[in-house]
Image (cartoon, rainbow, N blue to C red):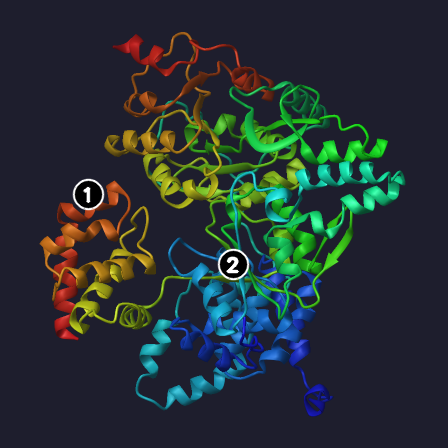
Amino acid sequence: MTEKPKPSPESIDDTLALLDGEDYVASRSLATVLFLSLKMHRPLLLEGEAGVGKTEIAKVVSKGLNRPLIRLQCYEGLDISTAVYEWNYPAQMLEIRMSEATGETNRSAIERNIFSEQYLIRRPVLQALSSEGGAPVFLIDELDRTDEAFEAYLLELLSEYQVTIPEIGVVKADEPPIVIITTNRTREIHDALKRRCLYHWVDYPSAVAELEIVGRKVPGCNPDLSRQLVAYVQKLRTLDLFKNPGVAETIDWATALTELNSVALDPEVVSDTIGTLLKYQDDIARIEQGEGWKLLEEIKSELETA
Amino acid sequence: MGSKDKARPDGRLADNIVYFARALRRAGIRVGPAAVTEAIEAVKLSGVGSREDFYWTLHAVFINRHEDHAVFDEAFRLFWRSRQLIEKMIAMFSPIAAARARDEEKRAAETRAQQAMQREEERRLADDKEEIEFDARFTSSGNEVFRSMDFAQMSAEEISQAKQALSRLILPHDRVRTRRFKPSHRNRIVDPRATMRTSLKSGGELILPRFREAKAVHPPLVVLADISGSMSQYTRIFLHFMHVLTEKRRRVHTFLFGTRLTNVTRQMRYRDPDEALAECSAAVDDWSGGTRICETLRTFNRLWSRRVLSQGAVVLLITDGLEREGVDDLSYQMERLQKSSRRLIWLNPLLRFEGFEAKAMGVRAMLPFVDEFRAVHNLDALYDLTAALEDDGRGKVDPRRFLAMTA
């Protein structure tokens, strides 16, 4: 990277400006917790429904502060060899044969050679700790998908910013990385881990904020249409659907409607494009059986009076 | 920096944060001692600007569960009130004052936060000394009755018996292969890391393969237990069952339902069974009332299924299946529950195993969607419950057997 990493913001207002500069419309509460996490060097734990922009925050921070983004996607069965480090076994075997050929017999010398940094394959965690040139943004995405064992392993990493490799010793970061953890709440995260983090619940945005987001992310969308579709999505979220549409879905929908050259919502357009917004058959059926029609009438009359 | 660090001797902010943390703790939010110093640190960093910034700064440090947000909000409003007093006085002179006052009449979690503020104020429980005992089996109602429950304490002998019974318990389909490995002597998958390490014992002259195999663990268990009036006889037994289960296994989630659904997983984690049950009875307010199986299942499916069923959970449903309200939606909710769980086991403690016919509407609606239907004759002890759950071969527990009998 040619440009130098920027220092972390000095106040809540700076943080808000930083997010805003990268086209991320954030609430003041999010800016506050992000500012504190950067200042106090504490991991930030973001919880919320799918599609509210949790992962996006990490990307935006990495861009805004001009630091590399290292991402660890969690999944079931994630273990140390895929998350932290692995030894390069074929090369190690070769090294053993080589030392045999040269007649090296000192056992500890061989061991030192074999378990040296050159045979170490660095996985995301280790990369995050030993990154050159400024602390990177380390995103641990969807932590709830992995199991408790890995979560427990993270405790050392998150409180001391170090990992222990038995063959080498402790690897400690010169400058603690900016750690952002996201979870979708498909499993409760253990209290011990939560205690080490600053917690923030990322909620669906307000109508005003969502309108702003649509305006920035889908610049081609005409203002009347955006107002209508945002009002529609906001109404949908009050209906107790099985899965409420997130911001990502709103943006998809706005893009779809813009591509179709619609200028206003009507029942036909809604039913053609509802698949971008709702992802469960029951929810779609509910909206198509009249409830969607009623909703449309409501928002139209509300927007007229407003 | 210098002027910032020098605290004014008469400043009370740090003290107030300490008191505020204490108030939160009394309101049931777990605030550790380290959090207090962190909060002071955080406030120093962000600088006390607007009320909103101060609010979110404290929120970031003190709250780590979304559920606690409402209590925090209320506690914050009550505790840091003096500032608002001035705002209120200004508001008094403006025409919108009346509308504001109405707005603040009742808020969620206000009582809980308020109780925490009133120090050591005795909370009077309803002193209903009168005890009306009636056998409510085979009856059900949709009425919502709020009652508190007092369980007889479990004797030490009972506890040890229960633990013994449970240690013998083998639930059906109780082992799941994971994608993690453990060392193995069988010739399965080569473990390169162990191979390399052991080869160095001989200085690398001899490289003998080491093996590993997939590890098997218990799947998560989700217990949904009916605590309505018709089940009241058995409530104590299965609460104890769930407590021992929570202690013995990891990843057990417990829900109780009558007319509404309550998650008592955390309460069950108390070490002492009596304490755990007391906490449970405080958390639930629809003991021995009516049943709304359909409604509670819908709530569970919508709010909890994605949070607790995600890693292939086995669901244990303990209910008599006597549903008072319409059963149209019940089949649908059961189907959804079955499809999102690894295995749905219905344990019916009420109806006799041999003479039982699936006649009740609710039972008929639910039966097609369970994987196993297990009935218990008499549920007087935990032993009977575990015996009923033992994996005793298929066929006997097939729900279709019961449907065929009435057809």
At horizontal 68% and vertical 21% (from top left) the residue drawn is B164
Q: Amino acid at mark 2?
A: Asp
- Mark 1 lies on a secondary structure that is helix
Question: Whole-percent x and y of residue B390?
Answer: 55, 16
Image location of residue B190, percent across then percent down: 65, 28
Q: Is residue A37 above or below residue B328?
A: below
What SS does tag 2 mark? helix
The residue mark sitting in front, 2 or 1, is 1
Q: Image quadrant for the C terminus of chain B?
A: top left
Residue A261 shown left or right of residue B53 in the figure: left
Amino acid type for the residue under numbered disc 1? Ala
Callout 2 crowding tier (Cα within 10 Å): few <14, some 14–19, many ≥20: some
How far apart in space, not on screen, are marks 2 and 1 (Cα)? 34 Å
Residue hosting label 2: B68
Residue A76, label in figure: none
Image coordinates of residue B93 in percent, x first then y, are 36, 91
In this rendered view, identify the residue nearer to me: B146 or B96.
B96
